[in-house]
Amino acid sequence: MSDTVVVSIISTLGVLISVSVSVLVTRLENKAELEKIKRELEQEYAKLLFEQRVKAYPELFSLLSGYGKVIRYKKQSTSNLMEFRDRLDAWNNTNGIFFTESTARLSGKFRYYLRNLIDADDAQNVTDDDWSSIRKIIRAFEDSIRAEIGIVDTQPAGVAKELEQVYQFIDRRRGLRRAS
């Protein structure tokens, strides 16, 4: 083989290797850039979803907490339970899309439970155990939506030191009332 052919082959191989390396590097850079864009989009989506939850969940919390107090103060009735269920359904129709899977499941099961309890032939005879169960489910529901917006795990900026004294005072007063 002549020197010209050998030089030509070596030159061609050099160009092919250079092009191959260049294509490989470009593909890796593009893949990394796409991953970065994907992460940024996921973060933006999570931020927007969180903002929607922060807007919508206070109304649900108020509904749940309010009815929990109705039960605690022994003002519950089948009539106001039906109203509560209807309001819960209406809220869910508008905002349930923002739930995580576990909260959506809890919401669905709770609303189904209420429907069955109310639609039963003896709906007027909702028992004390039923009311207790409803209150427990409400507390779990409240905890679930708090967790979704980070309230459960977020530490306060500061702690009021006198709270422990207030708790003790209230507990002593409650004990006195129960004893009398």
Image: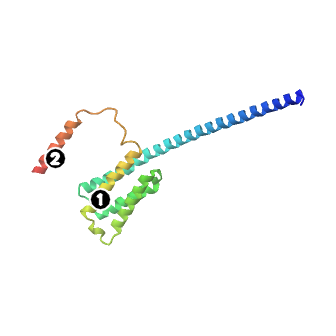
* Residue drawn at 16 percent across, 47 percent down: 174
SS of the residue at dot 1?
Answer: helix
Q: What amino acid is labelled 1 in the image?
A: Ser
* Residue drawn at 25 percent across, 58 percent down: 75
Q: Identify residue for label 1.
A: 133
> How many numbered marks appear?
2
* Residue drawn at 27 percent across, 60 percent down: 131
Q: What amino acid is labelled 2 in the image?
A: Arg
Residue 67 numbered mark, or none: none
Alpha carbons under labels 2 and 1: distance apart = 24 Å
Q: Is residue 175 left or right of residue 33?
A: left
Which comes sooner in the sequence, label 2 or label 1? Answer: 1
* Residue drawn at 71 percent across, 33 percent down: 21
Q: Quadrant of residue 125?
A: bottom left
Q: Quadrant of the N terminus?
A: top right
SS of the residue at dot 2?
Answer: helix
- The picture places residue 63, in percent across and down from the top left corner, at 35, 53
Q: Identify residue for label 2.
A: 174
> In terms of depth relative to the viewer, which is nearer, 158 or 7?
7
- The picture places residue 167, in percent across and down from the top left corner, at 21, 40
